[in-house]
Amino acid sequence: MLDGLTAETLARLQFAFTVSFHIIFPAFSIGLASYLAVLNALWLKTRDETYLNLFNYWKKIFAVAFGMGVVSGIVMSYQFGTNWSVFSDKAGPIVGPLMAYEVLSAFFLEAGFLGIMLFGRERVGEGLHMFATAMVAVGTLMSATWILAVNSWMQTPQGYALAENGQFVPEDWLAIIFNPSFPYRLVHMVLAAYLTVAFVVAAVSALHLLRDRTDKESRKAFSMAMWMALLVTPIQIVAGDMHGINTLEHQPVKVAAMEGHFDSHGDNQPLALFGIPNEQEGRLDYAIEVPYLGSLILTHTLHEQIAGLNEFPKDEWPPVAIVFFSFRIMVAIGFAMLGLGLWGAWARWRGKLYDAPWLHRAAVLMGPAGFIAVLAGWITTEVGRQPYTVYGLLRTADSLAPVDAPAVAASLMAFVVVYFFIFGAGTFYILRMMNKRPATPRLGLRDGPIRTAGITPAPQVEPDFIPGE
Amino acid sequence: MLFDLAFIWAGLIAFAVLVYVILDGFDLGIGILFPFGRSEKERDLMMNSVAPVWDGNETWLILGGGGLFAVFPLAYAVVMPALYMPIILMLLALIFRGVSFEYRWRTRRWKGVWDMAFFGGSFVAAFCQGIALGALVQGIEVEGRAYAGGWFDWLTPFSVLTGFAVAVGYALLGATWLVLKTEGELHIRMRRFAWYLGAATLGLIGLVSLITPFLEPVYFERWFNLPGSLWSMVVPLLMLGLAWSFFTGLNDGKDLQPFLSALGFFIVSFIGIGISFYPMMVPPSLTIWEAAAPDASLAFALVGAVILVPIILAYTAYAYWVFRGKLDPSEGYH
């Protein structure tokens, strides 16, 4: 089935596949680690058991998701070498040290304190346990910071020189790290992770509220999630808008593809709500457009010229249709999130937050929205920066390792089979845990690999019970 | 200049790989010994003995790979395509064994499946690491700035031998770790296992050491060229001392001594490999200095390593301290 594809296409497919699977888990664990730190802090402050129950509930879901993130992440750190070794050799002197910082400052922090956060509350005491929980959250944020610095440098490179042997050589590390697109991308991604988790928490709590609207933990969690949706979604939309303007400045071709702008429209750039990009003819078919809105959104003025795709050589274009549609999916989800946040606020104002079945059903439906938006957003930015790995400097086609197509095809098939099997099972276990109420004393078969003395009073050690089995 | 940035970094990467080998070595070893846990309860206990620390242990592998990418990008770009299959297989195997730590506790019906995944993943990962080591020792063909060999160059009788050697050695680490962490029947059985595994490991180390000097003339000279090789004699002598300490420790009923001696086997073997390799990064053609990134990269990354590695070691040690002592099966470990 993979016959006839070149090693390059297969390597692209493999990277797209493994990185798309991977990004789901960090997006979830960045948000969830912070949520856990907040829940534990609230438990210590108020001594309200609702928070402790919520902490213990989400902790177990976190453990499974984190495990999947670790193993899918290790694949990424080796795939640069196996499939993209020319990129590794050339960009290694700049990209490598930043990733080494990620490992040293973030991965070890997360992994080192995770054991204590999951299993150590009784062994180390509440104070140190809180510290460990906070360190896990800090670790996830540091990880995001470094890896987004790497990604942003590849999108908007600066602070480098080109050596004779073809390597990018660092000249100014501060310029490399704080490259033009980094702050926007970092804020946009961290907020996306927080929103993703807010909508997952909202969906799970809403599910339990639909079954029993008096469930204390679900009421508390739903209320927290709805505040997040209401307050963070508008901030995210503003951050996304600023990110877009930054992209227009540094990667105008990408923005033209996102907007489906083939022709420059002088000083009246319409906004295409929908259409089908026709790359051969260089136009947007079946376009539904709003006059002036394109200029307004991208330049915040009514009369400023924006370059269309046809002003750039075709070998500089990304695959337009993918970028065009994935961008629309992301934006549509963003506004749907805003809508749900407002709906929640309205229900709260009327005193019916926990008594609004249709709101709860909508929240359940929106549970996976964050993941889809994160994926669509990354597809937009990563496909949109093609045909380059280091933007404007190193083409993807020139980054490839000297690999044979059959080797890449075989490993791609293996990754597809293993990922669907492993992560399918993991998702199933997570959903099964989510299907139980947060106050359920024994959530999984057992509570996780290690429980120390005294956590589980003897009478509670009931025979293992798993719903659905 | 000897003590320049590239040399320091070669030492740091070697240190990270060594720490990975001895820490994840006993985790993987427990996976390899998993089928020898006689009851579900014993297997629970075996897995529990590493559950709080395996994650941190595996992070050293990311540092090994990521560090190589950061400071020796050329070596990384040559070695990864050369070891394409063993590396990909190892990654897939690590996925299976990594998730089974969590999945195993989330189902009853499929518990056996994740038991198998834990064993299979651990064994294949260990075997592939050994193959990668063997393939590196026998040399990697380089042309210009890229790997120039074929897709199965890594597969030789020698690399298969090193694959088994590493798997057996990891099983030894796992067995001695369980001697240290458990009591009762499992403890007694593992003490017996450790004896056989120790003998097998030493035999395999001996065999690999005998073959290695004949793979490359450079290795031969390093080991059999007087008077320089007198220093190299220290390595087999150290190994003999450790073997003595290992077997007497086992026979005298000591818990910690066999584990530390087994770690010693790995450390001394590692030093032996270092003596063969130096100054090569990728034998037989890339030296440490040829493979190194520019000084600006090395210096920047070194600042982070000097500050962060000691901190990492400190909190890793703390995590081990928190979960110290014998596992108590009645302690409410589920």
Image (spheres, grey):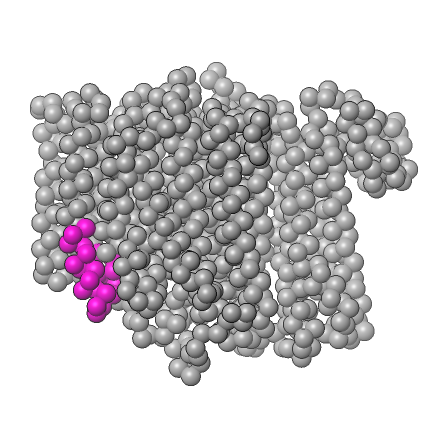
In the figure, A30 relative to A468: above or below? above
In the figure, A391 relative to A114: above or below? above
Q: Residue at x 62, y 31 (%)?
A: A156
Q: Is residue B112 magenta?
A: no
Quarter that holds the N terminus of chain B: top left
Please give the range of residues in magenta.
B176-197
Where in the figure is residue A364, as x and y percent of width and height?
Answer: 69, 63
Q: Residue at x 34, y 40 (%)?
A: B128
Where in the figure is residue B186, as x and y percent of width and height?
Answer: 23, 65
What's the magenta bit mostly, secondary-structure-wise? Answer: helix
Q: Is residue B196 magenta?
A: yes
In the figure, A6 relative to A150: above or below? above
User: In the drawing, does residue A290 fall left or right of residue B121?
Assistant: right
User: In the drawing, does residue A75 fall left or right of residue A259?
Assistant: left
Where in the figure is residue A334, as x and y percent of width and height?
Answer: 74, 51
Q: Nearer the viewer, residue A3 or A362?
A: A3
Q: Residue at x 34, y 61 (%)?
A: B47
Q: Nearer the viewer, residue B24 or A115?
A: B24
Q: Can residue A452 be seen in this snapshot? A: no
Q: How many numbered callouts? A: 0
User: In the drawing, does residue A76 fall left or right of residue B247?
Assistant: right
Q: Residue at x 77, y 74 (%)?
A: A352
Which image quadrant is residue B291 in? Answer: top left
Where in the figure is residue A87, as x and y percent of width and height?
Answer: 51, 27
In the figure, A260 relative to B101: above or below? above
